Amino acid sequence: MSDEPPIKTTASRIVFESRWTTLREDQIERPGGYEGSYAVIEKRRAALVIPWDGEHLHLVRQWRYPTGAWSIEFPQGTLNGDPGATRQPDEDEVPEIVARTELKEELGFTAGALKHLGALAFAPGISNQFCDVWLATDLTPGETELEPEERGLVTPLVVTPEEFDELMYDGDITDGATMAAWAMLTRRGSLPL
């Protein structure tokens, strides 16, 4: 197998840009000479944190505007740089810093231990964004530090692993990253039950 990309980019333009997202449209050539276009959502590398206090998992219930629904998730996100910025920073922050920041912002916790479980692609058919998955233990509670855009949209939810499984199997957890992170954690035997 060749590592050469089977699709060639022949032209590219930025359609939209903000401090959170860039939408790029590429003109491409597929194998066999078939030409077309591809829209790519560019986003910074994210972190997803699984907070575990030894008995409970700590999640958030968050309003997600694109789906028009509340979503039960592990804390996750990116650092968005300067609030006055009109575009995303060129470089990603150190992954562990992103994880610790998201945990503090959304749930108020500081983790004594943070274990990297791996990475996943959020939506590889439309976006270049990857997400590092972390297990946070030895949690010290504190005050949340929600960004202004998140206030009133994020509330904590504390569950046992069994309750988490029920929420997932009943369809109450629909966030793909949360379910993938749970699979990473449980398949590797990383949750010290």
Image (spheres, grey):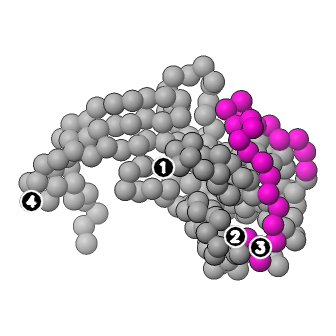
Amino acid type assigned to the residue bearing label 3 in the image: Glu
Badge 4: few (under 14), some or many (20 or more) residues near its Cα, within 10 Å? Answer: few
Give coordinates of residue 68: x percent, y percent.
Answer: 56, 46
Give the residue type that dot 4 points to.
Answer: Gly
The residue lying furthest to the right in this view is 141
Determine which residue is flagged by label 4.
Answer: 32
Left or right of 158 on screen, residue 40: left
Of callouts 3 and 4, the N-terminal one: 4
Could you tell which of marks 1 and 2 lies nearer the N-terminus? Answer: 1
The residue that mark 1 highlights is 129
- The amino acid type found where label 1 is placed reads Gln
- Residue 167 is marked as 2
Amino acid on which the number 2 mark rests in the picture: Leu
Between disc 4 and disc 2, the foreground one is 2
Q: Are marks 3 and 2 in contact (CB under 8 Å)?
A: yes
* Magenta range: 141-164
Per the image, is 42 magenta? Answer: no
Q: Residue furthest left?
A: 33
186 vs 92, left or right, is right
Tag 2 or tag 4, which sits nearer the N-term? 4
Q: Residues within 10 Å of mark 3 (few under 14, many from 20)?
A: few
Q: Is residue 162 magenta?
A: yes
Left or right of 190, for residue 7:
left
x%, y% of residue 76?
Answer: 65, 51
